[in-house]
Image (cartoon, helix red, strand yellow):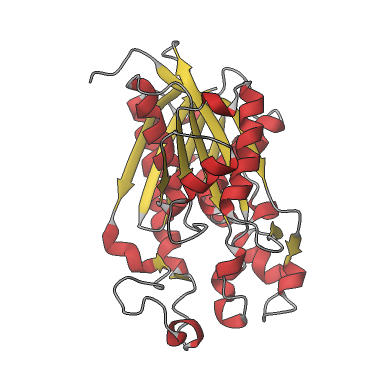
């Protein structure tokens, strides 16, 4: 089927985080770290953690309702639900189905995207294609994560665990007849040979049973995230500019024409280094990792939602989104608000 002559655009945004705020000083009480150590290495000052048994799909439903309200669209008008997450509610069914249930939807197609840090941009590319093909008119795209229940919050795991937080954010995409407005292009990449550089190894279907006591309490703690930080940092500094340049070239635009850059909130030092490398002034890069930590698939839409809320994104603005992370995967998107 040939694509119809329209773009997709974001008509509504919304976000939700748990009320519990966890500061660096609180983490310093349970592991050998300090506020200074964490801020110097990551830029994170605090993050939000769930209390009780809140699920990613539940946070996502609240964010989705806010996005729908902004777009003045009822939940019953949604044609497709895409949920981006690495912290699924349960092993199966997919969290998108549970999100749909939380919204009271019936008969609406729904699926998960499991591309971790790049998940939202992968989901955005898929949503954009569904609208451009004419198959859908209203696509709900949500990124949601509950990291706090899956972190090694001891000195052993501090290099990773101090970075992450819980949260969700949503956007609603609709058709846009103006070809100079909305999602101008999306660009996706992956290189699986680096998979073990940033991963969670267990539970795993490669073993019988999939989860053992040794995986949980063993010296390596195989159920917890592992990251070769310097290796990831080096590759991020290469892939972020590549992805951004690709999006700009595809649209015959320059770095100077972009009003705001929103990068995946992995590490403030990465965002600052990428901006410096590309000659972008700090005030043209939106960061909120200091208050939320890395919320993985939720980080870009959460930052976008806040940027819109604060008036940092206005009608007509050119916005560049970019991500890099586990997989390795990296991606970018260019949109005219």
Q: Quadrant of residue 233?
A: bottom left
Which residue extends farthest left?
1
**113 over 226 or under it: above or below:** above
Q: Position of residue 122 (x, y in %)?
A: 39, 41
Q: Position of residue 287 (x, y in %)?
A: 63, 45
Which residue appears at 38% of the width and 57% of the height? 235
Which residue appears at 65% of the width and 41% of the height? 62
Which residue appears at 38% of the width and 41% of the height? 243
Which residue appears at 49% of the width and 60% of the height? 90
Residue 111 visible somewhere in the drawing:
yes
Q: Quadrant of the N terminus?
A: top left
* Camera-nearest residue between 25 and 5: 5
Q: Quadrant of residue 61?
A: top right
Q: Position of residue 36 (x, y in %)?
A: 71, 69
Q: Quadrant of the C terminus?
A: top right
User: Would you say 241 lies left or right of 308 here?
Assistant: left
* Camera-nearest residue between 113 and 40: 113
Which residue extends farthest front?
106
């Amino acid at each position: 089927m040939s694509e119809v002559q329209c773009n997709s655009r974001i008509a509504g945004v919304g976000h939700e985080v748990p009320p519990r705020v966890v500061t660096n000083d609180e983490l310093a009480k349970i592991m050998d770290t300090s506020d200074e150590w964490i801020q110097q290495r990551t830029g994170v000052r605090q993050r939000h953690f769930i209390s009780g048994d809140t699920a990613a799909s539940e946070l996502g439903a609240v964010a989705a309702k806010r996005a729908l309200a902004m777009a003045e669209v009822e939940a019953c008008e949604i044609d497709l639900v895409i949920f981006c997450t690495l912290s699924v509610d349960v092993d199966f069914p997919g969290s998108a189905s549970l999100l749909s249930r939380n919204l009271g939807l019936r008969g609406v197609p729904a699926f998960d995207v499991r591309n971790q840090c790049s998940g939202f941009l992968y989901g955005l590319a898929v949503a954009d294609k569904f609208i451009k093909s004419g198959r859908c008119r209203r696509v709900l795209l949500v990124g949601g994560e509950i990291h706090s229940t899956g972190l090694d919050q001891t000195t052993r795991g501090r290099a990773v665990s101090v970075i992450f937080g819980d949260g969700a954010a949503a956007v609603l995409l609709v058709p846009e007849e103006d070809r100079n407005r909305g999602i101008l292009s999306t660009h996706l990449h992956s290189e699986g040979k680096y998979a073990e550089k940033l991963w969670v190894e267990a539970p795993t279907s490669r073993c019988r049973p999939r989860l053992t006591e040794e995986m949980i309490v063993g010296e390596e703690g195989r159920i917890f995230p592992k990251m070769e930080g310097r290796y990831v940092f080096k590759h991020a500094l290469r892939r972020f500019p590549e992805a951004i340049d690709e999006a700009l070239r595809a649209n015959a635009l320059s770095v100077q024409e972009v009003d705001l850059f929103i990068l995946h909130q992995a590490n403030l030092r990465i965002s600052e280094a990428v901006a410096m490398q590309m000659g972008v002034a700090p005030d043209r890069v939106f960061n909120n990792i200091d208050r939320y930590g890395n919320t993985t698939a939720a980080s870009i839409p959460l930052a976008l939602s806040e940027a819109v809320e604060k008036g940092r994104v206005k009608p007509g603005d050119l916005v560049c989104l970019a991500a890099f992370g586990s997989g390795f995967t990296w991606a970018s998107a260019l949109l005219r608000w």
